[in-house]
Amino acid sequence: MTMTAAAPLTRADEYLARAREVARVIEAEADAIEAGATITGTVFQALADAELFWILVPEEYGGAGLDIVGAFRVIQELSRADGSTGWAFMANSCSTAVAVGFMDQAGAREMFAGPERGITAGMIVPTGSAVRVDGGYRVSGCFQFASGSAHASWIGAGFVVHDADGNPVVGPDGQPDCRIGFLPRAEIEFLGNWSVMGMVGTGSYDYRVDDRFVPDRFVMETFSTVPTRPEPVYELGLLGIGVGGHAPVALGLAERALQEIAGIVATKQRPGYATPVGESDLFRLDFARHEALFRAASAYVYEVYGAAQAAAAAGEPITDELRARMRQTATWAQEVAGDVVMFAHRWAGSATVRNPSALGRCVRDAAVATQHALVDRMTLVEAAQAIVPGYLR
């Protein structure tokens, strides 16, 4: 009998294996993460030791240099272990990718290529203000939702540039000049204010920037479409990377909910059921339908982002339709996760009511995740404009 040698592990396989090892640590720390409203020191160290924070940083700078599909599979696995940890990690790794891919490379090299490799977090939507000064900008503003900021070394602050009279500077396209600056953590005033029903452990704190100087090398255009790095992954753009990262978080939540409910109903007894609930035809029908939804969402997420990555790698433009599908699937994955998690919640009975409960966390986390502005249903309306024409004859 001829033995066929196993295919060598790819770089993506290697980092997914690392994520699975770290997931065991995360699961053991999940209750402490929720109690402390941010990931624990033990989990942070496990993520850092496995070098997962830098999965979307180029190999030239000491990162993994993964493509978007490989990175998303890591995010999904960490989110399966704990939704808050997966969300915070997604915010860190995706904002780091945006910074290194679109910032002046002198600044990116300083932030990420040295012995103290940077981890970013923060609100990049232009809610702050700044004035242009020699060599950079003076930035001020109050910001919210800095997921993963408790362990980040650089904090992003989105701002609109103003002139000396306090008026927004308008570019040639008639739009305000919007930019993102990254500041060292020590220059940020954190305000706390993270008491929420779900995604509790993300550490999404409010913070303030008070007239801080940000050099040009740490500033990028908010809506830039031209990467400063040659790696194909950055061709997906700020939205493709930053918004897209929400999809694998949703998939991880759905996957964990299915795992939890399968275990709960295996021995659960209820009035009206002659056998454990998990052996009833009604449950099995409901499970099969929702498991199919999860599988379909997973396949679509990785099909679409894989196609975008392949186009970029081939030097081909990512079409408007494909970019619309990236937005579509990021939102749809959240909707599917919400449905799958609520299916599990309904069948679990009191198992999600008493704390601590992994499935209870999934319920609360999914309820919060679906409220994010970047996965609002209006994104599906916008995406349809580029998708519908493909069906017209």
Image (cartoon, rainbow, N blue to C red):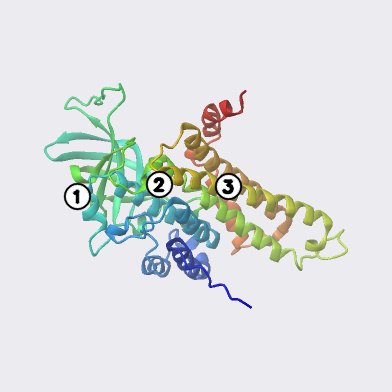
- Front residue of 381/349: it is 381
Which dot, 1 or 3, sits closer to the camera?
1
Check disc 1 and give the amino acid type.
Ala
Q: CA distance from mark 1 to mark 3?
A: 41 Å
Q: Is residue 236 left or right of residue 362?
A: left
Q: Secondary structure at mark 2?
A: helix
Q: Earlier in the sequence, mark 2 or mark 3?
A: 2
Q: Quadrant of the N terminus?
A: bottom right
Tally of numbered tags: 3
Q: Quadrant of the C terminus?
A: top right
Which dot, 2 or 1, sits closer to the camera?
2
Check disc 2 and give the amino acid type.
Ala
Q: Which mark is residue 56?
A: none
Single out the residue that lies furthest toward the left.
Answer: 134
Figure check: 111 above or below 320: below
Residue 330, x across and y down, in percent: 52, 43
Q: Which mark is residue 313?
A: 2
**Pointer 2: residues within 10 angstroms few (<14), some, or many (20+)?**
some
Residue shown at 42% from the left, 53% from the top? 67
Q: CA distance from mark 2 to mark 3?
A: 36 Å
Residue shown at 24% from the left, 26% from the top? 169
User: For mark 3, what is the residue?
Assistant: 367
Which dot, 2 or 3, sits closer to the camera?
2
User: For mark 1, what is the residue?
Assistant: 106
